[in-house]
Image (cartoon, rainbow, N blue to C red):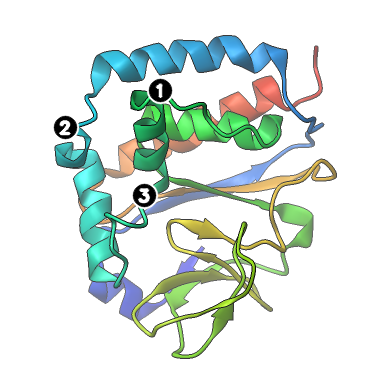
Amino acid sequence: MEMQTDILNAFPGLFVAEGRIGPLTIEVGSSRIKARADEINGWVQERYTLDGVRDEPLFRAYRDFFWSVGVDPTKTRPASEALVRRVLAGKPLPTINCAVDAYNLASIRSGIPLAAFDADLLNGDLTMRFAVEGEEFLGIGMKKPVILQKNQVILVDENDIIAIYPYRDSDTTKITLTTEMIHLVACGVPGIDKAQVLEAYDLAARYLEEYASGMK
């Protein structure tokens, strides 16, 4: 992934890990993933408390990054923190399909937000840049596009905006039951070691291959 110079200057140490994973066979739900989810839910209950999550150094780094790009992390939480909070609050995790569910579990376990795109719907290589004031973006779950501000960090392919980094992926390149190849991105921010980002990517890749490979 190319990072434009102004991004690197603004956020020294920012690092991502990315790659293609597949071919996959994606289904709705998977009884095989439930045992892993139960294991990770138990680990979360032992590792964190609901009152203490916001002060965890890992999540604090993402919160600080959110503030720096104009996003209020008390209203729009980093994805990994939001998932951990769901577990701690006793709420069920979202179940989308076996691929999304698998990398969500990897995000919970690693604490690193993950982005995933249908690789066959991407056009060319990815670039990280600042948004241009007034650009529009339609993310997963949005009813209408949002207007971007110039300090927001985005991921683009050669044609379109595919994510607001590191918390909202595009609706047009989302993972569906017809997806066969996934372009996975483990999203680092300043203050997060490269090793942690790489470990999160490896864990997500392993979970995807284990639970979305079509093997019974």
Q: Are marks 3 and 2 in contact (CB under 8 Å)?
A: no
Quarter assignment of residue 68: bottom left
Please report the residue visible at 46 percent of the width from the left and 88 percent of the height from the top. Answer: 132
Q: Nearer the viewer, mark 1 or mark 2?
A: 1
Q: Nearer the viewer, mark 1 or mark 3?
A: 1
Please report the residue visible at 73 percent of the width from the left and 69 percent of the height from the top. Answer: 123
In the picture shown, does residue 45 fall above or below 139? Answer: above
In the picture shown, does residue 213 fall above or below 57? Answer: above
What label does residue 90 carry, if any?
A: 1
Assign a secondary structure to mark 3: loop
Mark 1 neighbour class, 10 Å CA radius: few under 14, some 14 to 19, many 20 or more: few
Q: Which residue is mark 3?
A: 78
Q: Which residue is mark 2?
A: 52
In the picture shown, does residue 166 fall above or below 81? Answer: below
Q: Distance between the Cα atoms at labels 3 and 2?
A: 15 Å
Q: Distance between the Cα atoms at labels 1 and 2?
A: 16 Å
Please report the residue visible at 54 percent of the width from the left and 14 percent of the height from the top. Answer: 36
